[in-house]
Amino acid sequence: MLVALWHAEDSAMSLYFLLACPVVPEDVDSSDTSSPGDTADSGDTATDDGDVANDVLVEVAVADRSEGFDLDGDGRVDNALWYTKNLVDPLIEERLLYASNVAVLQLSGIDGWTDDAVRVGLFNAVDADGDGADNASGDEVVEAGAAVDGDGLALVGVPTGLVGGAYEVELGTNELLIGTFEFELATGVFVSAVATPDGQSGLIGGAISTEAFEAALDATEADGEVIEAALNHADLDLDGNGENDALSMAFEFSAAPVLLSSP
């Protein structure tokens, strides 16, 4: 069960429950279609024929200490990246401006902003002009390629409901793209957001091993000071050996409507 927490104490606890509840693998079966009657495993993209909204992440920052997700089941926020917020935020802001690939949150099957049968998807797309400064314009066009089916619906997604536009999900993918940072999480991607016709805002994040975090920042030639500072605050124990080997991360975000090029 996903729990997004906005006001709680920070803690460092072992992540044993993740070992018992592995991340659902990304569905890449080519036989999976928008028909719920196919034989592929879990990635049916069918909806109830409601509206579809695609929103590209345009503003992202490390969430405050009291904001994030309960990743270890103790009822409290896990967001160790908060300790390095002042170092990480400027890097994210810069990289969002020139990233050629962008993260898109998709809501499909929308019949209203209170709706018990919608689908939330997440995929990476190509920003053809490579200019993040205009992604909030509302008429930016991105290319999703093989990340969506023939109807333009995300291959990675989960069913959920909306209450006044609000929803909470854990997506069955461990890929989280923030600007040019490609994070390979040890969990699924957690999202707690509110959607409107003008876009979405909320929290996104998960847990990442210290090795994967270091690799993601090294790939963009981030300052070693940032990496060291973050790793010093590892707060989760993925393998249960008594030593913290992962970081909890939560980012606050806003996302703006974006257009998909024809599949």
Image: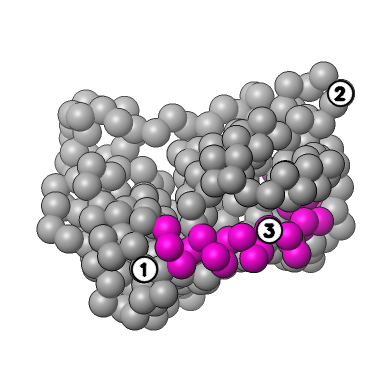
- Let me know if residue 232 is in the magenta part: no
Q: Which SS class for mark 1?
A: loop
Q: Main secondary structure of the magenta part?
A: helix
Where residue 237 sits, quadrant-wise, is top right
Residue at x-position 64% and y-position 39%: 213
Q: Earlier in the sequence, mark 1 or mark 3?
A: 3
Sort mark 1 into few (<14), some (14-19) or many (20+) by Cα contacts within 10 Å.
few
Q: Which SS class for mark 2?
A: loop
* Residue 145 in view, yes or no: yes
Report the amino acid beneath label 3. Answer: Val
Q: Position of residue 6 (x, y in %)?
A: 73, 65
* Residue 166 in view, yes or no: no
For label 3, the residue is 88
Viewer-side residue, 143 vs 79: 143
Q: Position of residue 112 (x, y in %)?
A: 34, 74
- Image height check: is 53 above or below 124? below
Sort mark 2 into few (<14), some (14-19) or many (20+) by Cα contacts within 10 Å.
few
- Provide the residue span drawn in magenta: 70-99
Marks 3,2: beta carbons within 8 A: no
Locate residue 206 relative to residue 255 in the image: left or right: right
For label 1, the residue is 131
Locate residue 169 relative to residue 51 in the image: left or right: right
Viewer-side residue, 214 vs 222: 222
Where residue 9 sits, quadrant-wise, is bottom right
Report the amino acid beneath label 1. Answer: Asp
Residue at x-position 73% and y-position 50%: 226
